[in-house]
Image: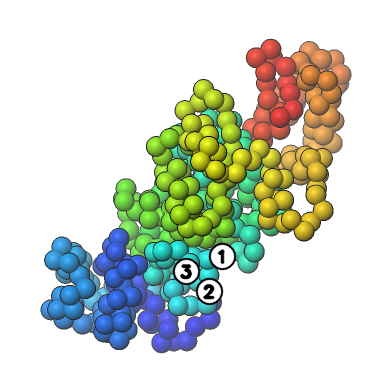
Amino acid sequence: FAVGVESIVEVYYMAALAHLLGSRAALLGPRLAAYFGSAKEAFEASFEQVKASGILTEKGAQHYRKWYDPGLPQKIADYCEIAHISLLGIQESGYPASLREIADPPWVLYVKGKLPNLTAYLAVVGSRKATGYGLSIAERFSRVLASEKIAIVSGGAYGIDAAAHEGALLGGGKTISVLGSGLARPYPVRHKGLFQRISETGAVISEFSPFTPPMAYQFPMRNRIIVGLSSGVLVVEAALKSGAMITAHLAADEGRDVYAVPGPIESFTSKGTHALIKEGAHLVDDPQDLLDVYFPEDVPKGAHAVELSLFETFPVPDRKKAEALYDFIKGGNGKQMEEIMAHFPWPLSFVSMLLLRMEVAGMVRKSAGNRYLVR
């Protein structure tokens, strides 16, 4: 983003104030800046002057005093330069317009990578303790939608979040991960490699200063940014009491569309999605349902076009064989392994590999009678 020198200086003071104000930065930061004339003047004011403003509570003032560091703006600026992070203030042109619309937009936003220049953003969220069914649905939906130029937004957590990000990357599309910690302390740590891959084509973002560790109260704050960036939220799997349900209700409150994928009625991670559907969320069971919403002017692609896109994740030498196997399974009521082996002159290990990839991608499933069926 292109801003003048004074604006750059100001945004680092905004970030420093946000760090000192913690969870109330979005509300109190602008008030302090308005009271003193700028974020820079507010940060450089004495503690007595800040306290005399009456903007901070006694507890907030003590927190501010405890963590105040006159070198903080420079430390943030240095880190952002070294780590190639952009810092966006709410007033800047690069700040996402949709995010400004929510009730409590972040005052500053740290961006690793580049926010996609796409018109459609969809949040995909769900359980951290996802089932195989949920993981395959999240991956498949995200892969197909991202390949059609829809940016996939999620929280980078285990389970559905990670599957959504991976699917978008597999589809050659863009994805955004919103962290509940600072960019220098990404959480979960095991997803550090995933966050790096996301930032190479999309963005990893946070409202927290780079040095902020993950804290429980920060994740609900993170969820409002996921909602704010997106025009709709797709809940793949969720227990009745879960972060994904909180995100869905927040989305409804902010006027965003809520979509939910039905699941097995005996699964506790389907209880939440079914409750959302009963409350009025849109039931979706195919990526085309969402493509029809986001691109209604397009000619309907139909099921076959979506199926073809699934094979893009297979190694090139295996694609035609994978398509042939898929078409064979589609016939009748599915096929047992014995029928498949009798039909194709391929080693069992190769057939098993293709079937496993199809199961993980959500293309086929194995029935109780050991028959492979197209989903």
| x 36%, y 62%: residue | 208
In the picture of the structure, the residue carrying the numbered disc 2 is: 94
Q: Is residue 19 above or below residue 285?
A: below
In the picture of the structure, the residue carrying the numbered disc 3 is: 100
Q: Is residue 166 above or below residue 324?
A: below
The answer to whether the residue labelled 1 contacts the one labelled 2, judged by CB atoms less than 8 Å apart, is yes
Q: Position of residue 103 (x, y in %)?
A: 41, 64
| x 48%, y 78%: residue | 92
| Foreground disc of the pair 2, 3 | 3
- The disc, 1 or 3, on the residue closer to the chain's N-terminal end is 3
Q: Which mark is residue 115?
A: 1
Mark 3 burial class by Cα count in 10 Å: few <14, some 14-19, many 20+: some
Q: Quadrant of the C terminus?
A: top right
Amino acid identity at mark 1? Leu
The answer to whether the residue labelled 1 contacts the one labelled 3, judged by CB atoms less than 8 Å apart, is no
- The disc, 1 or 2, on the residue closer to the chain's N-terminal end is 2
Q: Secondary structure at mark 2?
A: loop
Q: Position of residue 71 (x, y in %)?
A: 26, 75
Q: Position of residue 343 (x, y in %)?
A: 86, 19
| x 29%, y 76%: residue | 31
Q: Is residue 295 left or right of residue 64?
A: right
Q: Secondary structure at mark 1?
A: loop
| x 17%, y 75%: residue | 54
Q: Is residue 114 above or below residue 276?
A: below
